[in-house]
Amino acid sequence: MLKSLTLLVLILCTTLVVTHSRVIEPNDANTVRQTCSKTPNSALCIKYLNADPKSSTADVNGLALIMVNVIKSRANIAVNKINQLKGSIPPAQKVALKSCADKYNAILVADVPQATEALQKGDPKFAVDAANDAAIEANGCENGFSGKSPLTAENNVVRDASAITSAICRLLL
């Protein structure tokens, strides 16, 4: 009888702990939706965050870090395209392409590390600034071609990801 009672108590305690831990889980799809609803492009935000499995357990700061990584990966894609274009771009666009290379270098060498460090140290203001700067750099690249940019898709993606990142970081202020 005592053994049966002990087993019953153990099962009830285990069930309570498991149930309670599910209730206080740090994040779920609703948290991603709620966070993304406060950004300029909710659907794109949800798409980016849901693509990373860490989003299911991340808090808002973690979601911001995931978005910084999106900026980084998308900026690397732009750099790869810039490198592909170097040999085939018309001479009139070479200056603009070089400017884009410099702008994307700034995103990868300055903005992404600044945003990451700021979020890790709990200082989201500098992460907002870095994300905003990344958007400005992408827009600057686009505008350098005077309407004939071969990088429009990449610039738009980095700009949009940066705007989403900035909005999420502002939630931490």
Image (spheres, rainbow, N blue to C red):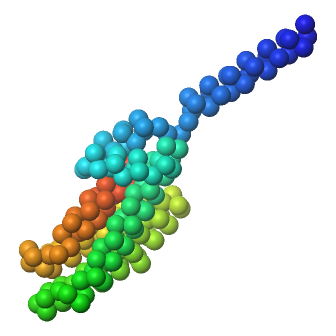
List x then y, in percent, for residue 142. 17, 73
Which residue of the protein is positioned furthest toward the right in this rendering?
2
Between 88 and 170, the residue placed more toward the observer is 88
List x then y, in percent, for residue 93. 14, 86
Between 18 and 115, the residue placed more toward the observer is 18
Q: Is 53 above or below relative to 91?
A: above
Residue beneath the point at 34% across and 46% down:
46
Left or right relative to 116: residue 35: left
Which residue of the protein is positioned furthest toward the bottom in this rendering?
91
Residue 73: name its quadrant: bottom left
> For the N terminus, which image quadrant?
top right
Residue 42: name its quadrant: top left
Q: Is 38 above or below relative to 115?
A: above
- Kindly tell me whether residue 5 is visible in this rendering: yes
Q: Is 18 above or below relative to 27?
A: above
Residue beneath the point at 21% across and 66% down:
153
